[in-house]
Every structure is written in C-alpha cells, then in structure tokens.
Amino acid sequence: MLSRRQLALALAGSALPAAFARAQERRAIVLGQSAPLTGPSAQLGLQMQLGAKACFESVNSAGGVNGLPIVLHTLDDGYEPARCKANTEKFIQDDVFALFGFVGTPTSLAALPLATQAKLPFIAPLTGADGLREPFNKLVFHVRASYMDETELIVKQLTELGLKKIAVFHQNDAYGQAGLVGVQRALARRKLTPTAVATVERNSTDVALAVKTLAAAQPEAIVQVSAYKSCAAFIRTARKAGYGGLFYNVSFVGTQALADELGKDAAGVVVSQVMPSPFGAAVGLVDDYQHALKKLDPKAEPNYTSIEGYIAARVVVDALKRMGRPTREALVGALETLPAYESRGYQLRFGPSRHVGSSFVELSMLTADGKVRR
C-alpha cells in the first residue's frame, strides 16, 4: 500500500487549481488523469499515478521536453463513471493537452465519447476491454494487452492442466462483462461453457451470495474479474466455506494490492500480467523505472501497477520528444511512429493502424509472504 509520503505526493499532484493555473502560465504540457485516489479501488489509481509521476519528475528535473515541463493533473473519481465524466468535462474546459492513464473500464467508457468529440488524445487507459479498442479510434492508444488476451491464456493453462469445471466471479459492470465474455469465448473454443457465474457490485465487498452460488457448483477453478478488495473478500469467504479450488485473476485486480489485502491467504492465487516484471535486477526500461521510482520516493517498492504508469508516461515522453511544435495532431502522429520497446518479453509497438501496442501476457503466482512468482 502507499505510504503516508506517497499519498502526500499523489494528492499534491491532484486537484490543485492554483498549481494547475501556474503550470498553464509558465507553458507546460498538461495531461489530465481521472483515477480512483480514494475508496475501495484507490490503490489502482494511486499506484498508476505514482509510476507516471516517477517518469515525469525525472524528465522535468532534467529540463522537461524541449524546455517544457510535463504536469500530470489528476482528479479523483472513486472508480465511478459519473465522477469520471465530470472530471473529463473539467479537463476539456481547462484545455489540457491530452488525457492520460485513466483507470478502469466503466470510467474510461464514460470519458471516451467526450474525448473523441473534443479531439483529445486518450492515452494508456488502465483497462483491457474491447469497448475501448473497437471500433478503431485514431485518438486512443493502449500500452497493455486486452482482457481477451488475458482470459485466453488463463483458460489455456487451466484446460491444459485437465480442468474443465471453470466458474467466473465478476464485477457487475462493463469491466466484469468484458472479462466474462473473454472467458466464455476462450471456453467456447474448447467446446466448454462456464460451470457457474456470479457477480459483485462495483466498489462493494458483499460477496456472500456469489460465494454461495459458485461453491454450490463445485468448480475446479474460479476466474475472478473484479478489483482487489472484492476479490480478496471472495477468496477468504470461499475458503472459509470449504472451497479448495484454484483462483485466477486478470491484471486489473492490482497484484500488490491483492497480495496486501490477503496476506498469508494469498498463497497460490494466480494473476495474469500484461507488464514486464518490475522486480529484481534489471536493464533498460525496467531499470529506468526502478531508478525513477526510488528517486521520487526512496521508500516506494516496485509493483505491476506503478510500472504500467511509468511505461505509459515513458511512451508520452518519447512521443513528445519527436514532435516539433506541440499540437495534439502532432502527438498522435509521433505516437504512431515510436520505435519499438522490448523488456523481459514485453514488446510495445505502434503504427498508423496499430494503436494497441502490446499483446504480451504471462501468468504469476502470489506467495504467502507477499511476493510474486513468475
């Protein structure tokens, strides 16, 4: 979880109108981010913001991009679509340069029509939903694989282990539905269907009925498509009820946040990952991330969510460096011509008709001591 210092850094970069106005006055590249900074999903937004700020602060300390500092203006949406929509309307009113690092499927879907109408680049939302990828949108760029990619790998591994009774626990919104569809399609390719399906409301940990429903079906594995607090509550409650099967999660769960919530109960829980491992000795992109994170906050520990924020920010920085006069059209063009990134199996490449930069997915397992094993 974020330390008190990290939380102070996050809030310092959030909704401070005076600081925002000053950034505009001194000529800056201002990016608008809507993310949960409070509430049950806060760690997703705080860590995404932390990784991005680590990158931007490193660049700004060296003089910015062509002399212009990059300002990340983050507004809290509590992982609620209506609040995200209001935040996006404010960003448009404030004439931010681009939208960046929005967190979540239902929130990003609420923002996308506004961004499209305002012709604002919409870069690196933390979601793998196809609703943000299809149909193709010239303004939208993704740095992560889709939920279809993640659920395909999960189902592939489970069925290769000989397991066929697979259930789904999902958030009752666009995010959960996207994950459910991914599992259904992956199972259908193998002439299977979910053994049972149960839901939880967004920002809720009321999982009793879902546990009762799925436990009664006696699945061999449960694929979870929700945020970390509800998934942790489900795992604990299911195990107390005697369920002894496997738990698989998609990346949006927030790997470190889930591990922190579960403690020793995390042992054996599997999470699919769409970013390179942020841990251990590293070179290149991951090494840059580790150094930037420590420079921003020496107490910060690497994790999968903050490295996604860093990589997303790095993409923006490298695109800005390729521009002449900073315009939104020039930013889109620069993003489409970025050279490929590669690190620990993760590859990122964009083009004029390729705005989904990566399909990289791998599986990891949580341990009882809060570690992540690949």
Image (spheres, helix red, strand yellow):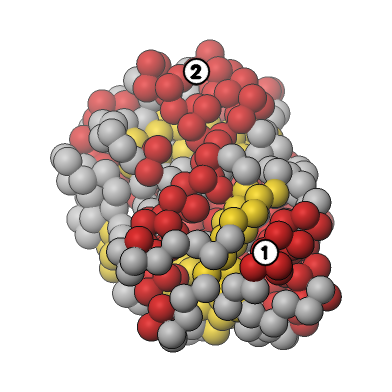
- Does any portion of residue 26 appear in the rendered image? no
The spot of residue 107 in percent (x, y) is: 56, 34
Q: Is residue 46 left or right of residue 272?
A: right
Above-or-below relation of 281 to 134 = below
Identify the residue shown where x is 40% and y is 34%.
Answer: 122
The quarter of the displayed image where residue 326 is located = top left
**Residue under pointer 2:** 92
**Residue 362 at x, y = what percent?**
41, 73
User: What residue is drawn where x is 64% and y is 25%?
Assistant: 82
**16 to 290, vertically: above or below:** above
Could you say where residue 74 lies in the image, as x and y percent from the top left? Answer: 61, 36
Q: Look at label 2 and name its amino acid.
A: Ile
Residue placed at 44% from the left, 70% from the top? 154
Camera-nearest residue between 3 and 82: 82
Does 191 sit above or below residue 113?
below
Q: Residue at x 50, y 35 (%)?
A: 108
Three-letter code, disc 1: Leu
- Residue that mark 1 sits on: 214
Q: Earlier in the sequence, mark 2 or mark 1?
A: 2
Question: How far, Cα to Cα, is label 2 from label 1?
Answer: 44 Å
Question: Does residue 245 appear to the left or right of 32 in the view shown?
Answer: right
Task: Determine crowd level at label 1: few under 14, some 14-19, many 20+ residues with C-alpha closer than 10 A.
Answer: many
Of 354 and 225, the residue lying toward us: 225
Q: Residue furthest top?
A: 93
Mark 2, mark 1: which one is toward the viewer? 1
> What SS does tag 2 mark?
helix
